[in-house]
Image: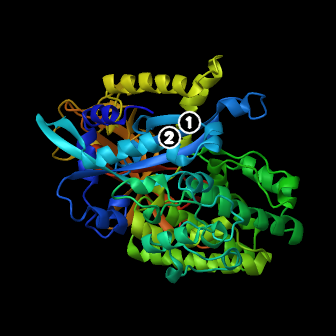
């Protein structure tokens, strides 16, 4: 186990970390739900506190540092324990240095010892962080910061095992949130609030001492933490439930229908169109491999979560024109696409949450009617997502994608090290060195604007650009070839959008400039929407000759995107939950 108090003290005293955390602790006042601080659970737990209380999420997941078929695979299978602060902005959480290592445990030990023994020291640390806090220096003053366990996160199997709940998805009472039995879950198209678990029902179930009737093995060691209880751990992982679950089931049925039943297109045509489609520079790293016939026949598609996300997102653009608009299965797919869109948002309104609830109900009904298939456990989890947004914040802010990405550091070290004795200690020492490096280099919070790789172009200002600048001083203004904002690179030709008055406005970057104070400006041309295409679930757009200037890029929220050309027309793949001007 790593020294969590020491880590958190050094982490919070690093440049801009505590400032950004304190900004994220304030609940949203504009009607949007973002992180867990906007959820009802966190608000209820912190209402009586006047201290600085920071949420802390734990992440558990197993990985192996060698080939899974190796004779030594069992000795190198590790349960990683990470923790992070979920109220930080998304672009900060995406940086792996902000996911801290709490420790490593051999997976074999988890089978041999009870959770009470394995996690007792971790729970003691969390209790101390909640009751005693840590003293840090902030803006020249000593302040005490307290930490409260937000949620225990990970995949479904991992969370169930850590919380001493039944792990089998075939169990009678598998759901962590409600007590619908297996046969009810296979048909449910909506959730039943009267069956929700709570603290009182949890202890009543413990007294029954029958896993088949309750889904609870024993009292969790994490219930020792004063403010935490298993019944409050209303968390679902978007990566496993949606992209590796519901989307895989639905896509396999859709492809089987279009290729084998309806014969709308062939598998070769699908793969050919996918390979010819220009996904764009933002999606090039996650283009899926060709789909094999055996995968469709078995209703299983073997792709990573990122590849499924890319395939589902752009499927309407490269295959939509081959499918009739009145096809019921295509209507099902478009409905699934809208669900994916809402769940991937980092901020949602109450109306969008109700829309999601309605879309999920329609999706589950269509899935059973069209494919004559029963609903899977991950379909049931999807029923609870709308409610979990209200209680726990948006799932995108806390999903497991970056946590699993954190494994790469340990895997790389484990593979180059020939010493497999006490591998957990070796990995912890390596993680300690990595953390020390990040502290010394203040590499936790990336700069909003990074000009490190920018090159200056000495050409003089054009007359058109001087006119666009208007009354702005031209002294010291220079052209640059690129800049990076929140990890995204912007250069000539980049397409991006801004949101103004809840309306999306598209632009194409023509030139970049900076002044003597390194304040950056964009010269861009406007891209207008011609309307929404329901069949392709995309906005048709067209370029204009209208030039605009964005004066202070650092203070303007911008989002890089790709446009896609289909049959001579430009499309922006975005569902119509927001107007595009």
Image quarter of the N terminus: top left
SS assignment at label 2: strand
Q: CA distance from mark 1 to mark 2?
A: 8 Å
- What sort of colour scheme is used for the picture? rainbow
Image quarter of the C terminus: bottom left
For the point 15% across and 41% down, the residue is: 143
Seen in the image, is 10 located left or right of residue 383?
A: left
User: Residue 167, located in which quarter of the rendered image?
Assistant: bottom right
Q: State the image coordinates of residue 463 (x, y, percent, origin top left).
A: 28, 40
Seen in the image, is 274 located left or right of residue 538?
A: right
For the point 72% across and 80% down, the residue is: 326
Q: Is residue 217 above or below residue 15?
A: below
Q: State the image coordinates of residue 523 (x, y, percent, origin top left).
A: 34, 45
Q: Which mark is residue 81?
A: 2
Choose between 171 and 433: the one closer to the eye.
171
For the point 48% across and 65% down, the residue is: 529
What residue is disc 1 on?
105
Seen in the image, is 139 located left or right of residue 512?
A: left
């Amino acid at each position: 186990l790593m020294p969590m108090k020491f880590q958190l003290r050094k982490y919070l005293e690093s440049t801009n970390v505590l400032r950004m955390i304190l900004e994220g602790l304030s609940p949203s006042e504009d009607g949007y739900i973002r992180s867990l601080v906007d959820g009802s659970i966190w608000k209820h737990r912190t209402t009586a506190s006047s201290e600085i209380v920071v949420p802390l999420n734990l992440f558990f997941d197993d990985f192996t540092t060698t080939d899974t078929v190796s004779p030594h695979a069992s000795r190198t299978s590790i349960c990683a324990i990470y923790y992070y602060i979920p109220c930080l902005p998304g672009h900060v959480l995406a940086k792996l240095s902000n996911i801290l290592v709490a420790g490593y445990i051999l997976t074999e030990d988890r089978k041999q010892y009870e959770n009470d023994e394995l996690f007792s020291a971790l729970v003691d640390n969390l209790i101390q962080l909640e009751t005693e806090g840590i003293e840090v220096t902030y803006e020249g003053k000593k302040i005490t910061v307290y930490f409260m366990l937000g949620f225990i996160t990970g995949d479904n199997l991992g969370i169930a095992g850590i919380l001493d709940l039944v792990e089998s998805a075939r169990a009678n009472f598998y759901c962590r949130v409600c007590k619908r039995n297996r046969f009810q879950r296979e048909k449910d198209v909506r959730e039943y609030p009267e069956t929700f678990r709570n603290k009182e029902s949890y202890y009543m179930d413990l007294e029954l001492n029958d896993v088949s009737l309750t889904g609870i093995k024993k009292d969790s060691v994490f219930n020792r933490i004063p403010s935490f209880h298993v019944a409050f751990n209303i968390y679902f992982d978007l990566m496993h439930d949606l992209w590796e679950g519901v989307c895989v089931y639905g896509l396999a049925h859709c492809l089987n229908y279009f290729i084998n039943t309806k014969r709308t297109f062939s598998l070769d045509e699908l793969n050919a169109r996918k390979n010819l489609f220009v996904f764009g520079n933002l999606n090039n790293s996650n283009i899926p491999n060709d789909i094999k016939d055996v995968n469709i026949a078995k209703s299983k598609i073997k792709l990573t979560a990122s590849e499924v996300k890319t395939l589902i997102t752009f499927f309407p653009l490269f295959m939509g024109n081959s499918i009739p608009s009145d096809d019921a299965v295509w209507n099902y797919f478009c409905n699934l696409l809208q669900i994916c869109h809402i769940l991937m948002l980092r901020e949602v309104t109450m109306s969008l949450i109700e829309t999601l609830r309605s879309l999920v109900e329609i999706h589950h009904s269509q899935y059973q009617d069209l494919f004559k298939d029963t609903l899977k456990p991950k379909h049931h989890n999807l029923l609870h997502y709308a409610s979990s947004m209200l209680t726990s914040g948006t799932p995108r802010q806390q999903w497991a994608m970056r946590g699993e990405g954190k494994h790469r550091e340990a895997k790389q070290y484990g593979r180059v090290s020939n010493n497999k004795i006490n591998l957990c200690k070796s990995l912890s020492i390596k993680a300690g060195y990595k953390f020390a490096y990040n502290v010394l280099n203040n590499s936790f919070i990336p700069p909003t604007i990074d000009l490190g790789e920018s090159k200056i172009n000495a050409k003089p200002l054009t007359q058109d650009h001087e006119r666009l600048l208007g009354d702005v001083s031209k002294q010291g203004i220079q052209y640059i070839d690129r800049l990076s904002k929140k990890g995204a690179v912007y250069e000539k030709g980049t397409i991006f959008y801004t949101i103004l008055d809840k309306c999306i406005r598209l632009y194409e970057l023509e030139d970049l400039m900076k002044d003597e104070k390194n304040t950056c400006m964009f010269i861009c041309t406007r891209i207008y929407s011609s309307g929404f295409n329901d069949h392709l679930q995309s906005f048709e757009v067209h370029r204009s000759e209208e030039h605009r200037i964005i004066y202070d890029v650092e203070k303007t929220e911008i989002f890089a995107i790709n446009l896609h050309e289909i049959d001579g027309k430009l499309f922006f793949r975005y569902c119509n939950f927001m107007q595009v001007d």
